């Protein structure tokens, strides 16, 4: 069993424990739980969570196993600040909005989420050739979210009056899914096959409720709290249902010890319906079907180099409705990727390089508030590199970098050729860790790293630039016998930065400096 305790410098605390104990010859159980409470960098904003996930496994033999598992999650916090571009990314006449300012009101604001699921995983291996599995899950979610969120300035920025919207949403959702699959292993001459075939079914029901009305403005320089009640108006009140049936087949072929080929195909049939209480003329009952699949080829050389190429098509039904009450169209995509992996036998290093082109149709984005939009097509071309290596005895390195070129290729005329809002084109990180392997300091170590995010845009016209940022993190840790301890710090320089904007009126500060301590004991 393992127990760990975390303490955070800003008043946040957490305890989590988990473990596995063998009870008899056939039964095993595990319980993972988390409890946390306390504040955040924003005043009057808590971040409280309870989580428990028990699991019970019955394994009467090495060939058969049944696991019953579930979880319950309860979140209690407040809404996120929606701040204007002027006053966060760039100076307003009065300067910058403080990172700890709470722009809503505790008399109204709360975010309450209860989420639970239960199910099982069953597998039985008949012999070295055939294996059968079935996974089943039922999940439920209910959410109660009320907030006063910023919608830009009331008047000129110099007046420092933040307009606010009184928003409420109380959705509930239920999901049932079952997946039955079998695999068979066999050879045809020099070719070894692992064939996987299956059928899955999903039923998703969302009861959506959203309301909005104008709220009282807030003086950013001299905030005065009031006594507010949730809005009674509703602009969304509907039930959307999706039933999805899919069949799939995949063959992983190994030709000798060098060449691997993966071929897979899937066909989905989706029934979609919406019952709109506010606009019955927007009701819909229809269906759609699509084929998706993947093909990948990899060759391994003796000296550790393995080039590969793959192509895939995707089909993903999107839950929920647009602001006009109509259903989202399923998202479709195509991806072409080529690259090389390097893992020599004589040196503990793994390096991967890849280039890709990804196209996504019916891409979901936001209008900057709580409404979601769909774009005709977004194309992403890019390059990725990642490395994981042991440089010397006790010194390890983990690094990655991604460079993208993002472009809207189908959509409204004004956004063609533009980049989607809030999406950077550069991501990079590097982390070094040294742990003493011998002597009196054995088990003691320290680590440091840097992570960077490139610039993005705050508007669909790409005229408002959000600068990128670079942060430094560090850690000191110790492990010996059953004990583990660590002190972790993120954003060591306590840099103030805007992590992203979804519109000119919806910008969000990133997390300031945070420290945490963890102590663990395993027995």
Image (cartoon, rainbow, N blue to C red):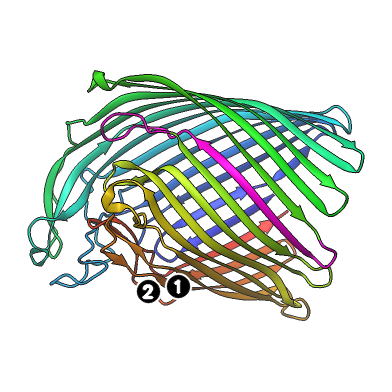
Instruction: Read off the residue under disc 2.
Output: 495
Q: Give the range drawn in magenta.
A: 301-329
Q: Is residue 227 above or below residue 201?
A: below
Q: Which residue lies furthest to the right in this view?
A: 189
Q: Is residue 304 magenta?
A: yes
Residue 180 appears at what percent x and percent y? 68, 26
Q: Does the magenta run of residues contain 261?
A: no
Provide the secondary structure element on which disc 1 rests: strand
Q: Position of residue 45 (x, y in %)?
A: 31, 54
Side of 347 where 283 appears, left or right: left
Q: Which of 424 and 413 is in front in this view?
A: 413
Q: Write down the quadrant of residue 284 in the picture.
A: top left
Identified at 71% across, 44% down, the residue is: 20
Q: Residue 19 in the image: x percent, y percent?
A: 68, 46
Q: Is residue 138 left or right of residue 512?
A: right
Q: What element carries label 2?
A: loop
Measured along the vertical axis of the image, is residue 124 above or below residue 256?
above
**Camera-nearest residue between 419 and 171:** 419
Mark 1 crowd level (few <14, some 14–19, many ≥20, 10 Å Cα): some
Q: Which residue is found at the position 50% from the left and 36% from the top?
A: 316
Q: How crowded is mark 2: few (under 14 residues within 10 Å), some or many (20 or more)?
A: some
Disc with the residue nearer the chain's start (1 vs 2): 1
Label 1 close to label 2 by CB (< 8 Å): yes
Residue at 30% of width from left, 53% of height from top? 415
Q: Can residue 60 be seen in this view?
A: no
Q: Distance between the residues labelled 1 and 2?
A: 7 Å
């Amino acid at each position: 069993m393992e127990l760990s305790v975390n303490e955070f410098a800003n008043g946040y605390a957490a305890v989590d424990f988990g473990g596995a104990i063998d009870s008899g010859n056939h039964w095993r159980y595990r319980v993972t739980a988390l409890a946390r409470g306390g504040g955040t960098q924003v005043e009057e904003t808590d971040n409280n969570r309870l989580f428990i996930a028990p699991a019970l496994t019955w394994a009467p033999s090495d060939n058969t196993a049944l696991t019953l598992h579930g979880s319950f999650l309860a979140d209690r916090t407040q809404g996120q600040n929606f701040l204007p571009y002027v006053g966060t990314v760039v100076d307003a006449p009065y300067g910058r909005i403080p990172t700890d300012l709470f722009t809503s009101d505790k008399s109204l604001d709360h975010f309450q989420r209860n989420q639970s699921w239960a199910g099982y995983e069953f597998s039985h291996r008949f012999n070295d050739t055939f294996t059968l599995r079935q996974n089943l899950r039922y999940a439920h979610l209910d959410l109660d979210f009320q907030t006063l969120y910023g919608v830009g300035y009331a008047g000129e920025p110099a007046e420092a009056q933040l307009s606010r919207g009184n928003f409420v949403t109380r959705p509930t959702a239920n999901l049932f899914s079952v997946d039955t699959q079998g695999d068979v292993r066999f050879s045809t001459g020099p070719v070894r096959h692992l064939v996987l075939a299956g059928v899955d079914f999903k039923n998703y029901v969302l009861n959506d409720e959203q309301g909005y009305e104008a709220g009282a403005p807030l003086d950013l320089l001299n905030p005065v709290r009031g006594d507010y009640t949730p809005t009674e108006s509703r602009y969304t009140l509907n039930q959307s249902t999706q039933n999805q049936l899919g069949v799939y087949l995949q063959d992983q072929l190994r030709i000798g010890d060098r060449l691997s080929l993966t071929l897979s195909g899937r066909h989905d049939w989706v029934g979609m319906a919406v019952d709109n209480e506010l606009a019955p003329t927007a009701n819909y009952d229809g269906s759609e079907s699509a084929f998706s699949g993947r093909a990948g080829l990899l060759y391994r050389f003796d000296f550790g180099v393995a080039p590969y190429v793959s192509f895939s098509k995707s089909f993903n039904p999107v839950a929920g409705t647009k602001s006009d009450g109509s259903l989202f169209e399923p998202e479709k995509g195509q991806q072409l990727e080529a690259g090389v992996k390097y893992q020599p036998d004589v040196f503990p290093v793994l390096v991967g390089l890849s280039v890709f082109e990804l196209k996504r149709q019916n891409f979901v984005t936001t209008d900057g508030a709580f409404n979601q939009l769909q774009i005709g097509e977004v194309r992403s071309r890019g390059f990725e590199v990642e490395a994981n290596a042991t440089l010397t005895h006790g010194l390890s390195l983990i690094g990655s970098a991604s460079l993208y070129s993002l472009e809207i290729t189908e959509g409204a005329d004004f956004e063609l050729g533009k980049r989607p809002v809030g999406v950077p084109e550069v991501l990079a990180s590097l982390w070094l860790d040294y742990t003493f392997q011998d002597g009196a300091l054995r088990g003691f170590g320290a680590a440091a790293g840097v992570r960077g995010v490139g610039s993005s845009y705050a508007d669909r016209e790409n005229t408002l630039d959000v600068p990128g940022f670079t942060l430094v993190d560090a850690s000191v840790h110790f492990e010996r016998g059953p004990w583990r301890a660590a002190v972790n710090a993120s954003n060591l320089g306590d840099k103030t930065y805007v992590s992203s904007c979804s519109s000119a009126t919806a910008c969000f500060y990133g997390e300031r400096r945070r420290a945490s301590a963890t102590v663990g004991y395993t027995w």
